[in-house]
Image (cartoon, grey):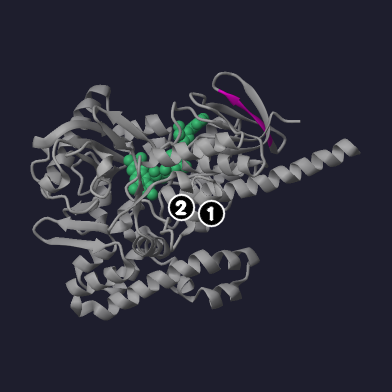
Amino acid sequence: MTDYDAIVIGSGNAGLTAATALQRGGANTLLLERHNIPGGCATTFIRGNFEFEVALHQLSGMGTEESPFILRHIFNDLGIMDDLDIVTEHDLYRLVMPGELDITLPADWTGLQKTLIEQFPEEEDAIVEYLTLCETITLEYFLNVPKAEKSNDVEMLNSTCPNYVKYGLRSAKDVINEFFRHPDLRAAIGAYWCYIGVAPKDIPFVDLASMIYAYAAYKPCHVKGGSQAISSALLESFHKAGGEVRLNCGAEKILTEGDHVVGVRTEHGEIFSCKTVVSNSSSIQTYYELLDQAPQQARDDMMSRRVGPSAFVLYVGLDCKPEDIGISTASSFIISDRDEEKVIDAMREMTPPVNIMVTCYNLEDPEFAPEGKTSLSILCLQYGEPWEKLSPEEYAKAKFEFANHLLDKAETVYPNIRKHIEEIEAGSPLTMMRYLNTPGGAIYGFDQNHQDSAYFRERMDAVKGLYMAGSWSGMGGFQPTYMAGSSTARASLKYIQTVSEQEEVLENA
Ligand SMILES: Cc1cc2nc3c(=O)[nH]c(=O)nc-3n(C[C@H](O)[C@H](O)[C@H](O)COP(=O)(O)OP(=O)(O)OC[C@H]3O[C@@H](n4cnc5c(N)ncnc54)[C@H](O)[C@@H]3O)c2cc1C
């Protein structure tokens, strides 16, 4: 008899989802988290009168009550949907290149098509064709690809997923360039690449296509109370179902016997036995630090991996309303070049960023900031590597300079931000590293390119009973990690059942 059926390491989105689904599925589960609050990236923090959202810019995958999408079903199954107050956004984003381009795309599938045609009438046919492709490829990907994969049936894949077969794994940039001629239209339709963190030339088209379809057709949203409200609701549901959580309690070792897991040792030296371990920590930490020896399968896999980007973020509280500085959309991308390669190059250096994202949380949810004030996040993606090389003195200077670069860029569209600052906090890739315990402070796991995507990677199964859940074993981001937590719980519940049946046979023998 083990202490627990399952131990989940880490309470990020995937860890919390897996723990809750396991406990509600009948598995006696312990959740270990090294930080003092649950959520990983999905948290908020307080400075002065402001509560700042750490990570969530736009939640995808919820849909509406009338037209629910996948995440609403998952949250229903986890028993938290009634605890969440969803704030639906009206626009996808405003994309601005000062003096050259300024376009706002609505969060509405037909409205999106109409807006693009109004702005680029000479490319009407291509716009209609492209958006139809995004819709059909998303439906094929979510509904038919899993069935074909499960049956390992190429014929079925070809007949039920023709668009996926033709376009799905092509480079997103190639497909966009094939459809469109105007550089502004190309930039406008592909702007969500920033949420994936690699240049469109390296993104499988299906990832970008399903992103714009999911956001536009099912609406981007926030949750009242920020992403912390989702994390807290998940923990509450886990508790209610009888789960046990230990905060401030990192896992130090995953214990194995032969080829399977048998327990976990915490950083405080306690040892708990279990049948299965779900790790929401990075795969690099899981295989190289938590296990005594990384299995060959993991070593082979990791050799060809690249750690993805982190971020530099300014959390800013202003003493004025959003409209006072010209904020008209909850999400904006401010770019100074349409060439994404230049953005990626800047992400690897300590040079001023080429692209930034500005999110105003109280534009669609006035309660998110004190009355008459504004809560902003100003973010650019940054790889952790150049930051890791800085001495402590250089770091302090670089953080200050980088904060100024971001403010300079934001002020090209929203003038006078500096005059209105009441609270400001900066988070660098090293901050992300400290709070998330990820290599390089990575926020989406490995680079989300063709080579690193889950499409071409084997599932790690060398250590029986050990499951990975989170951005390191699939796609990063909110929706994918909740989905990963849910599917990982299903797989580990099956494993627990098999182990329990084997134990019963042995006991009765
Ligand atoms: C600034 C920022 C902006 C972002 N913007 C967006 C966005 O707009 N849209 C979007 O979809 N995504 C966004 N993301 C990315 C998204 O938040 C993440 O990809 C996702 O939340 C990762 O979830 P996860 O389940 O992989 O776990 P994580 O959030 O990485 O959490 C892992 C947890 O495991 C814990 N842990 C690690 N090691 C141990 C150990 N040994 N023992 C115990 N606990 C351990 C950590 O403390 C942490 O709590 C953003 C992230 C950041 C930081």
| Residue type beneath disc 2 | Asp
| CA distance for labels 1 and 2 | 7 Å
Q: Secondary structure at mark 1?
A: loop
Q: Specify start and end residues of the magenta stretch as a single range.
A: 261-266
Is residue 211 toward the left or the right of residue 126 in the image?
right
Residue 111 belongs to magenta span: no
Location of mark 1 (residue): 457
Identified at 12% across, 42% down, the residue is 408
Judge the density around disc 2: few (<14), some (14-19), many (≥20) Cα neighbours within 10 Å.
Answer: many
Residue 505 appears at what percent x and percent y? 85, 41
Name the amino acid, label 1.
Arg
Q: In this orientation, does residue 348 appear?
A: no
Q: Which mark is residue 452?
A: 2
Instruction: Characterize the local packing of mark 1: few (<14), some (14-19) or many (20 or more) Cα atoms within 10 angstroms.
Output: few
Whereabouts is ligand 1, in terms of quadrant?
top left
Above or below 416: residue 456: below
Q: Quadrant of residue 427?
A: top left
Quadrant in which the C terminus is drawn = top right
Q: Mark 1 or 2 closer to N-term?
A: 2
